[in-house]
Image (cartoon, grey):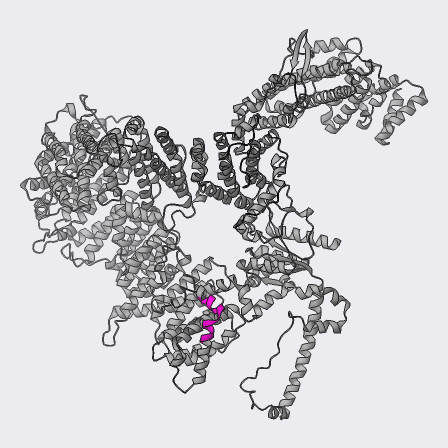
Amino acid sequence: MDSLVESLSQSFTVVPPTAVPAMLDCVVASTGLSHMSLFSSFLSAFPNLSKDFIKDQTHLELHQWANRNALKSFIWKCFIPLTKMVHSYDVELLNQIAESFFNVVTETNTWEVVEETVVPFFLQSVGHYIGMVENEQIAVYEWSSHTILQSSSGQMNEFEIETQLYDSCPLAISCHVLSFVLSTALRTQQEAQATSKSTLKNGCFDAQKFVGNIMWDLSIMTVRMLSDSLENRSCAISFLLPCIFSSLAFRSFELSVHGKEYKFSRKFFFREIWRCCSMLLSHGPLERRDAYAILSLFFSFTQGCEDVCLSDISEEFDIRQEKEFWDEMKRGLVDKEGLVRKQTLYILRRMLHLVEGNKFCSGISAKLSNGKSSIPSGMTRRGLWAEREAESMGLEKICSSVDRCLNAQQRWESFILLYEILEEYGTHLVEAAWTHQITLLLQSLQAPINSTSERAYEGQTKDLEDIFDWLPILWERGFCHHNPQVRCFIMQSFLGIEWNNHGNCAKLVPDSFIFGPFMQGLNDPVHHKEFGVKGVYSSRTIKGAAKFLRQFASCLNLRTGVAFVRKLASVAKQQSFGRAGLMGLAESIASAACGVQKHNDCGEEWLENKLSDNGEDFLDVLRFIIECSKQHFNPNYRLRVCEKVMETAMCLVCSCDVPLEIVLHFVWAVPQEFTNHGGSLRERMQEWLSGCGKKLCGATFCSTEKLVLVSLYDFPERFISHQCSVHFITYDDEDLDAWAFEAKRWARVLFLLINDEHHVEPILMFIQHHGNSICKQKNLFEAMPLKFLILITSIIRELQIMQERSHSRETTVILEKFAVTFLLTIEELVSFANLSCSIFWSRVVMDDPKLPNSIRGKLGGPSQRRLSSSFTTAVLKAIISTKTVASVLSCCAHFKSDVLDTAFTSLWKFCLKIVSSPTCYNETEAEIFLAAYEALAPVLKTLVSTFSPLALKIIAANSELVLLNAESRSLLDSLVLSFLENINNLLAAGAMVRTRRAILMKWKWLCLECLLSIPDHALKNGVPLHGDDFFFSDAAVRCIFSDLIENLENAGEESVLSMLRSLRLLLEMFYSEKLVSAVSSCFGMDTQMMWQLVRSAWIVHVSCNKRRIAPIAALLSSVLHSSVFGDEGMHVTDNAPGPLKWFVEKILEEGTKSPRTIRLAAMHLTGLWLSNPKTIKYYMKELKLLSLYGSVAFDEDFEAELSDNHDAKNEVSLLEKSLDPELTEAFINTELYARVSVAVLFYKLKDLAKSVLPENNNGHCLAALESGKMYLLELLDSAVHDKDLSKELYKKYSGIHRRKIRAWQMLCVLSQFIDEDIVNKVAPSLHICLYRNNLPAVRQYLETFAIHLYLNFPSLVGVQLASIFQDYDMRPQALSSYVFIAANVILHANAANQPSHLNELLPPIVPLLTSHHHSLRGFTQLLLYQVLCKYFPSLDSITSENNFLEKRCFWNLKSYLEKNPDCLRLRASMEGFLGTFNPKTSVSPAGIFSNRVEELEFECVPTSLMEQVITFLNDVREDLRCSMAKDVVTIKNESFSLDGDLCSKEEMVKTNEGEVLTELHSDMAFDFQKKITLNKHEKRNTTSSSFLGNEESYSFLLEMENEDHLLYQFLRSRAVSMEKLKGNCQNFILVASLLDRIPNLAGLARTCEVFNAAGLTIADARILHDKQFQLISVTAEKWIPIIEVPVNSVKNFLEKKKREGFSIFGLEQTANSIPLDKCVFPEKMVLVLGREKEGIPVDIIHVLDACIEIPQLGVVRSLNVHVSGAIALWEYTRQQRGR
C-alpha cells in the first residue's frame, strides 16, 4: 500500500488537478481496494503529499459519508494540520480546502462531527490567543482540551489529538475557519427553510440550533477581541463581525445553554458592539479607525433592518437613537485623517439609505422630473454654468428654487452632496456651485418640513437648531481644506450670507464653531492677502467676520451676549494668532461687544448684569491681546488693535468696577505713545477711565471719575507701606524693578486723569510730607524711603513727557506746582543721598562676605550683584537716591535758587569723589565701585545737560584735587584722564567676573560720553571759557581716542552705542569751527588714525545685530563724519583706496545682505556726496550698486523701530540728509530708498552745476557737473555692455528685468548732464539699446531718455532721428519707440524748432499708418492724431497757397482718424495715458518715483502707452480685424487653422500635380503679392513706351522674369511638399497658451511633432528663440505650426475654432470629467491644457464642450502638464489609427 500511495502521489504531480478524482475512481475499481483503506493510507502519508492532491482528498469522503470515524480522522490528521500550514502555502489553498470540506459536510450531513471537533478546536485556538478562559456557565461549546479529548476518545490515537491541541492554529486562520463554518451553516439553514425543512436527509441535525450555538460563542469572543489588542480587533473585524452581522440581519436566535434558555437578538449584540465602539472612540487614532470600521460593517450588513417587521419591536437596539453616536459622526466628518472622514461619510450614506455615487434615489427626483427644468431669467453665464454643474450632481433636485419645503431626507441628501463637493471634487465645482446651493438650502430652512417621519436620523435635521449643528461641519471642512483657494472661497461664502434674509438663523450658529473652526479660519493668512497693503490693516475677511459677529451678538440677550464676548476674547489665550489673525480677533471682539451694547437701553438690566464678577479676567484678556500685538512692530498696526480693544472695553467694562491694579496693568499695556499728550487714544482712554465711555454704567460720570481718582490718591500710601512691617528688610534689583514697574503704571494713569491743577493737590501734599521726613525714617521702615524715591522718579518721568508734548497753560501750571514742591524737599533728598552714598567710600568692608545662594557660583548679571544681601540693599539705596536727586534737579533747573546751587555743588562733589577713588582688589569693593559708577552715569547726564558757570567753577576749583597740575589750561583733562585711569585699573585688577566687567564697561562709556559732551552743552547753555582756557588738550583727546579704538573691537552690544557717540564727539571737537575752545592746538586726524578707526569700526559692525537701527546709524555718522569726508586723502592714497573708501566698500558689500544697512548708508552717503561733490568720482562702482539695488517691498519693522526707539530716532536724525526730504522720506521704509536717494543726489547736483559760469570758477559746481557726466557715461556703458543689462531675452518681473528698469530710471535723471562734449558718445549707445528687444516697462525709460536728448540738442533730430525712419525693416518694437520719440519731440519742441522737426519727422511716420503690425499701426494712429490736432486744428486755418495740397491731405487724415469708430475706441481706452508725457518731470526723481509708493506697482513703473495699446488690441483683436487691414502677422498666426487644408485633403490625393498647383493659387496660406519697387537709381520717366522701348531696360525685365520663374518653380515645389506634409496632419490642435514654463512648452512641441498634430498654441512666440526651449524641443518647432495666442485671447481663439467645426475639450478634473479611456474623440478636436498649478480658468471652462481626465490610482492627484498632454494626444492618435 505504501508503494501504491507513493506512486499515485508522483502521478498526481504530472496530471491536471481536475483529473485526480477520475484517477482515484479508476484505482479503486482496478485494485479492488476499499475507499476506506485507500483513504487511510493517504492520511498516513499526508505530510508528504502535494497541495494539489490534498485539496482533492475529500473526493474519497464522498464515498464514505456514513463513516464518521473516517471524517474525524481526516479532520485531525489532515484538515487541522493543513490550516496550521497555510502560512507555508497560501490562503487560497485554505479557501479551496474549506470549501471542499464543508461541501462534503453539507452533502453527508455530518455537522455533528464538526460540532465535536472543528468548532471546539478553533474556539480553543482563538481563546488561547486572546487569553480567554472558557466560561462553563455561558459557553455552549466546551472547548477545553479535556472536553475535546473526551469527545474524540476511542476513535483515534489520543496522543495525536493532544499534539494538535497543544499546537494552536494562528488567530487569523482560526477566525477564518470559524467564519466559514458559520456562513456555511447559515446557508444550509436558509436552504432548509426554502424547502420547508428544519433538518437535512436523516433528520438528525438541527441547522438553526447549530447556527445559534456557534453565534453565541463567537459573539462572546468577538466582544472580547474588540476590547483587546490591535491584532485581535483586526481579526474580529475582518472575519467574525461580517458573518455575525449577516446572520443577525433578519432574525434572532433562541438557544439553550446548560439547561437555561436564552434568546440571542440584535438588541443584545448591537448594544455590546456600540459599547466597544464607544470605548475605542475615546482612545487613540488607531482605535478610532477600528471603531469606524466596525460601524461601517454594522450599517453595511444591517441596511434595511427597520423595514423587516419583527415580533417584538421593543427589543430592537437602534444605534441612531444614541446622542453619542451623532456626536461622533460630527467629529468624524471633520477629523484630520482622510480615512476616518471617508469611513464616516460611508456610515452616514449607509445609514441614510443613500446609494453610492452622485445621484440620489429620493422622492424628489420623480417630483421634479415631471416638469421641464427652466433656466431662471437674468442669470449670469457663470450662474448658468453653476446650474449645469449642480444638475450633473443632482444638487438641483435637493435645493430647487421651485420647491423649498424639504423634508429631513432631502436635507440629508443636500448635506451629503455639499460635503462630497469639498472632499471629492475640485476647485471649479466649489467655486461654481457652493454659494448657490448653500443659499438655497438656507432658504429652504425657513419653511417647516413638509413630511413627517419617525426615523431616528431624520430627527437630526427636523429642527433649525439641529440643522445648525450639521452646517458648521461643512464650513469647518472648507476652512481647513488642503486647497487655499477653496478655503478662501468657503470663508467668503460663509461671510457673504445675508443672515437678515434668513430670519433669526444667525444665533443658531453654535458657539463651539465660532470659538474653534471659525477663529482658526480667521487666523489663516490665506484669507488676508490684502492685509497691510497701502497701510490698511484690514481685509475683506476681517470686515465680514466683524459684521457676522455683530449680527450674532445682537441676537443674544444681555447676559448671554456678555458671556459670549468674554469667551470670544479668551480665544486669544487658547490659540496662537498671526498678525492678521490677531487683528481679526480684536475687530471681531469689538464688533460683538457693540452688538451686545444695544441692550444698554435699560439701565436697570445693565446694572444687574454688569461685569463686576468677571471683569478682572475679561480686562486681563484684553490686556493680553494688546501685549500680543506688540510682537508685530508696525505702530499703525498696534494702534489699530488698541483702538478695537478700547472700543470693547468702553462697551462692556466700567473702570470703577474693576480693581485698580487690573486697571493699571491694562492701561500700561497700551503703548505710551498712544496715550501721551497728542496720542491717538488719549481722549478715548480718558473717557473710559472717567466712566463716560459707556452710556449707562455702574456709576455716573462724575462719581466714576471721583472713585478712580480716590483710588489713585490712596495708592502712594499703600505702596510705600506695603511689606514694611518687618524689623529689617533687604531687597535686590528684581524687587526694585517690580516696585518701579508698579509706580510707573500708577503715574501713567494718574496723569491721564489729571486735567486740572486742583487734581494734583493730594499728590503734592504726599510728596511734601514724606520728602521732608525722609531722613527721619527708622530701620523699622527701611524700604519706605526707597519706594518714595521710586514714586518721585516715576512722577518726574511723566512730567518730562508732559513738558515735551504739551504746551498748554494747564500743563505749565501743573509743572510749576510740582517744581515748587520739589524745591521744598530737595535739601532732605540731598541729605538722604549723601548718607546713602557713604557706602561708596567707606573702607569698612569684609574681605569675604557671604554671598546669597542664588548668586554663589554664578557669573552674575544686572540683577545679580555679587554682594551679600545687606550690601546689595545699601548700594541700591545709594543708586536710587542719587538718581532721584538728579531727576529732581533736572526738573527744577530753570529756577534760580541757593538751594539748587547747593544741590548741584553736592552732586559735582559726588562725581569728583567717585572719579578720584583709589583702585581696589577685592571683589566686594569692586562691586561697590561698580555700583558707584552706575550711580555716576545719570548724575553726570543731569549735570552736563544743565552745565552752568557754577559747574565750571567747581571743576576748576577741584582740578588740583584730582591731578596735581594747576598750570593746565585744559579744564577737563585731569577729570577725564583720572576717570579713565581709575576705571581701567579696576578692570585690569581682575577682581570681577567677566559679565560684571561688561556691566562696568557699559557705565564707563556712558560716563565718558557725558564728559565729552560738556563742551557742546557749554556752548548751547552760553557758558564761556575765560582767556586761553580749553576743555581738552590735544594729547588728552588723542589718549581718549586711543582708549576708544583699543576697546571698540571687543565692545559689547550695550556699550557700542556710547562708544560710537564718544567717537563722534571727538571728531566734532577735532574739526568743528563752533567748538574752537574745545581742544587746544588740535591737528585733526591723520590717515593712520583713520585706518585704525575704520578697521575697528568694521569689526564691531560685523559682530553687532544688523537688525538694530541705532548702532548702524551711529557707526555711519561716527566713522563717515562730515568733517573728515571732505578730505580727498581719506578716499584715495597712492592710487589705492583710502580708509573711508575701504570702509564704504565694506559697508555696501555687507549691505547687499542687510537691507537696513544699505538703506541707512545710502541716506548718509548721498548727503555727504552732495556736500562734497569732489569725492563722487571715487565712488562710481558704489553709486552703481546703490542705483541697481532694491525693490518697493515695505519694511514695517524699520518704521516701528524708528517710532518706538528713541536712540534709533535720534541717531537717524544725525545722519546727513538729502535736500529733498519730502520725497525721500516717503520711501524710508522701502528698499527703494537707496535708488531714490541717488536720484535726488544727482538731481540736486545738476542744480548746483547750473551755477557754473565762465567767470565763476567754483570748485564744487565744476565737480558736480563732472561727476554727473562721469556717472552717466559709466552707467550707460553698463547698459550697453553689461552681461545682464544687455540681455534681450528675459522674463517679465525677473531679476534682469528689475535691473534694467533701475538702470534706465537712473539714466533718465542723469540725462540732464548730457553736454556738447559727451552727446556724441551718448547717442550711439542709446540707439543700440533702442534697437534691442526690451519689455515696455524698460522701453518707456529709453524713450524718455531719447526725447530729453533730442529736445536739448535739436540739431541731432535731422541728422540721426530722421534718418533712422528710413529703415522700415527694423523691429516693430523699435519702430514703435521711435514713433513715440518723434511724436513727442514734435509736440514738445520750442516754437523755433517745431517747423523743422515737423518737416523732418512727420513724412516718415505717415507710412507706418499702414504697417502690417497691428500694435505699431494703432500706436502710430494715436500719436499722429495728437500731432495733427496740434498743427492742423481746422481747415479754415490753412490760408497759405504754398503746400495747400499737403496740408489738406493731413487735415483729411486727421478728420478720418477723428471719426473712424475703431480709432475712437482706441483713443477712448487710452484715456489717462494720452497727453500725459511731460519732458521736464519725466526726468526728475519726483516724476519717476512720486506717488508710486501707495500703489505698490512693480519697481514704481507706470503702465506705458504702448503697453496699454497692446492690451487693448489683444482684448478686442477679433473686432478690430473686421475693420482694419489684415496684417501679415495675424494672417500667419491664423494660417494654421487649416480650413482649406482639411477640407481639400481628399481632393489633393486624387489630383495630379497640375491640379494641385492650380489649387495652390487659391490657397491664402501660400499666396503672396509680388511687387517691384524701384529705388532712386532705377526711376525713369513716367511714359511706359520710353521705358519699354529701352533695350537695356527690356533685357533687365527679361532677366527679372527669368528669376521670377525660377523662384516660382521653387515655391511651387516647396508648396507641394508642404501640402503633402499637411495632408498627413491630424486634425488636433493643442492649446498651451496658459503655460509659462519653458521645459513643458518645449516638451509639448516635441510631442506634437511626433504625433503630427495640426498645431500648437503658445502665449509668446519669442520663447521659440530661447536656448533652453531649442535644447529640449530638438528643432520640433520648425516642423509643426506654432500659433501665437496670448492668454487674454485664448477664449476668442476657442470660440473661433468652435465656429469652424472643431470640438473643444479641456484636460481638467471637474464634476463631469470623462475618463480618458471612455472618451470617444471626434476627428476635429482642440485640447486645452491648464496652468501648472491652477488648472483651466473658470471662464475658459465655460467654452469647453467637455472635460476629460486621466484616471489615477496613486496618492498624488496630479501629473505634469507635459506628461498629461502627451498621454491625451496619444489616446487621440490611437483612436484615429483604429478608424
Task: Tell me if residue 1461 is in the magenta stretch.
Answer: yes
| Extreme residue toward the left, this view | 898
1057 vs 1579, left or right, is left
In percent of the image, x 50 and y 70: which residue is there?
1416
Q: Position of residue 413 (x, y in %)?
A: 57, 35
657 vs 1743, left or right, is left
The part of the chain drawn in magenta is: 1454-1467
Q: Position of residue 432 (x, y in %)?
A: 54, 46
In percent of the image, x 57 and y 84: which residue is there?
1574
Main SS, magenta residues: helix
| Front in this rendered view, residue 843 or 1546 | 1546
Quadrant assignment for the C terminus: bottom right
Q: Where is 819 relative to 1193, above or below?
A: above
Task: Tell me if residue 1613 is in the magenta stretch.
Answer: no
Q: Quadrant of residue 1624?
A: bottom right
| Front in this rendered view, residue 338 or 1244 | 338
Q: Quadrant of residue 1174?
A: bottom left
Q: Position of residue 1407 (x, y in %)?
A: 50, 77
